[in-house]
Image (spheres, helix red, strand yellow):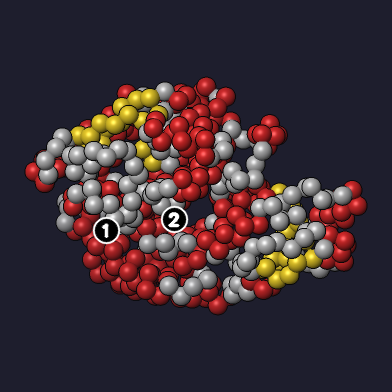
Amino acid sequence: MLRFLKNHKIGFIVFLLDTLGVIFIFNFVYLIYFKKPNEFNVQNLSNPTIALVLIGLTLVFYVLDNYNPKSTVFGLDFIKRTPLSIFFTTLLISGILFLTPYRYEGGFSGRGIFFLSLLGYMLYATLLRWIIHLRIKYNPKQHEWLIIGAENNLENFMRDLKSYNFNGHFKIISNKKTKHKNPYNVLEYVDLKNIKEVLKSSYEGIIISSYENVSLQISEDLIKTRLKGTPIYDLTDFYEEFWQKIPVFHIQNQWFILSHGFNLLHNPIGLRLKQFMDYVLAFTLFMICTPLLLLIGIIVGLSSKGPIIYKQVRTGLGGKNFTIYKFRSMVADAEKNGARWADKNDNRITKIGKFMRASRLDELPQLINIIKGDMSFVGPRPERPEFNEKLEKEIPFYDLRHLIKPGLTGWAQTMYPYAASIEDTREKLQYDIYYIKNYSLFLDIIILFKTLKVVLRRKGL
């Protein structure tokens, strides 16, 4: 949890300021509207209407990325996002407050107060993000990083820097200049012999990609630098800290011996608690969603020929196979030429199938798999046995995915788009290993909320 707050500290601060803003503005509007102050006490903070507004704003702002620093602080995209968020929040809460029998006496249930407060909050939220944007101007040239011994892994590392649009410039220290044609944000290459002179400058951090050429003298110089306050990361630690994944191209067997984490694997109480929560939540959702399941089944049956429920063998916990259930989203003879990954413009996918895949409605029958105990709500997505055999040969540590139950959703599914190649699968594995290593109930909750955001924005997983 502390790591999550550290990585999202700006978004968390904005969330706290938003919460205080909602409470203050609603009370201020009450004062103007009724010419008398509203009692501001602990009981008032639990006002159902305020709570409803806070929940609605938080969900809508999260779905529209209004707590993402890249969109709310370092860019000006919030100018259009904030009013749009308030608009959708108004529609959501209006439906609950005014289209249902719900009323709350003695609070903020009046239409005038409600709409004036949201209007005032829209101005407040936009101004808040504008001030933060002006105060935090991030200049990557002022944030230099030092990389030691990076020649072996530079290509993978630089590719990831570009894909994440990482803010910062990098100085490479190695015995030889890399052959990489277009390094991303690399300022210069420095010979290892000059490291003492290089370390005199200040850096955002130092990354050790390879210890091969780190001599005793260099180690002593690095110790002095660290004691002065400059953070030093192993390449794996950097990936885990900043990008929440484990670089499979870099780790070795020794890393698993010495690395912390992986607590869920030897925690029977935690495993039973996770299984119990999976069962209760899956059974509850299945009962609630039964009418929706029937409706989707009818639509699938009428839209194209073939079975409504598609059954497929997948590999689960411990490498054991099980049958997974999905609403059919492809034509009936989709694999007449053999099994292959689906791609973005796959002509085998039906029209209703495209919508179901984007919204993940085709996965709803997997609630039965969770109830049966074959799957969990959160975990690595199960793959087909015929693909697993090839992937285990091509991708190091791929079989680690089978250490825990596969999930309806997962960290990899919320952090990376649909896998349509071995390279995509390798990328997703890095997130799966991070999840297995850092499992916690808090992380599961984050994944479920991120899944909700992806589903509502119909990006697919």
Q: Amino acid at mark 1?
A: Ile
In this orientation, does residue 99 appear? yes
Which residue is labeled 2 in the image?
41
Q: Position of residue 363 (x, y in %)?
A: 28, 40
SS at mark 1 in the image = helix
In-front residue for pair 79/391: 391
Residue 98 appears in which quarter of the rendering?
bottom left
Image point 68% across, 50% down: which residue? 235
Image point 70% across, 71% down: which residue? 187
Q: CA distance from mark 2 to mark 1?
A: 24 Å
Horizontal placement of 153 versus 222: left or right? left
In this orientation, does residue 284 appear? no
Q: Amino acid at mark 2?
A: Asn
State the mark number for residue 368. Answer: none
Disc nearer the start of the sequence (2/1): 2
Q: Nearer the viewer, mark 2 or mark 1?
A: 1
SS at mark 2 in the image = loop
In-front residue for pair 269/390: 390
Q: Crowding at label 1, few (<14), some or many (≥20) Cα neighbours within 10 Å?
A: some
- Which residue reaches farthest right? 217
| Vertical position of residue 363 compared to residue 36: above or below | above
State the mark number for residue 93. Answer: 1
- In which quadrant is the N terminus drawn? top right
